[in-house]
Image: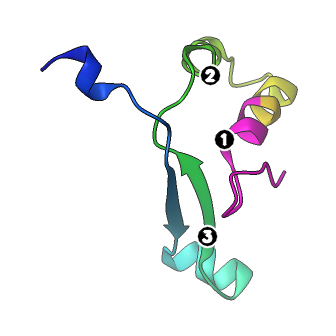
Amino acid sequence: MKLKELAGKPQLVMLTLDDKEIVEKYGEAVTFNVLDKLPISIYTKLATIKSDDVEEMFNVLRDLILDENGEPIM
């Protein structure tokens, strides 16, 4: 596979969390969007984030969880 084939404009992908626990807690499935391709800076943040650094975890999630227009919703 050529890297050029992987290049392209990121597309929004809808994700739905609908397992039993989520539906019981919120009364319905939770739906949000993410980009199918992310900047390398996001991958770097994800790889280096520490589980006890809640603020940095929030900052990364804020960039990932988007509405249907690709805008952050957190």
56 displayed left or right of 67: right
- Quadrant location of residue 45? top right
Q: Earlier in the sequence, mark 2 or mark 3?
A: 3
The kind of secondary structure the magenta stretch mainly shows is loop
Residue that carries the numbered disc 3 in the rendered image: 31
Q: Which residues are magenta?
A: 60-74
Q: Give amino acid for label 2.
A: Ile
- Quadrant location of residue 5? top left
Mark pair 2, 1: CA separation: 9 Å
Residue that carries the numbered disc 2 in the rendered image: 42
Q: Residues within 10 Å of mark 3 (few under 14, many from 20)?
A: some
- Image spot of residue 57 (x, y percent): 75, 30
- Image spot of residue 26 (x, y percent): 72, 80
Q: Residues within 10 Å of mark 1 (few under 14, many from 20)?
A: many
Q: Residue at x 48, y 73 (%)?
A: 19
Judge whether residue 70 is colored magenta.
yes
- Image spot of residue 54 (x, y percent): 82, 30
Q: Give amino acid for label 3.
A: Thr
Q: Is residue 15 above or below residue 12?
A: below
Q: Are marks 2 and 1 in contact (CB under 8 Å)?
A: yes
Residue sitting nearer the eye, 11 or 62: 11
Q: Which mark is residue 64?
A: 1
Mark pair 1, 3: CA separation: 13 Å
Judge whether residue 59 is colored magenta.
no
Residue sitting nearer the eye, 33 or 7: 7
Which of the image's four quarters has the N terminus?
A: top left
SS for dot 2 = helix
Q: Earlier in the sequence, mark 2 or mark 1?
A: 2
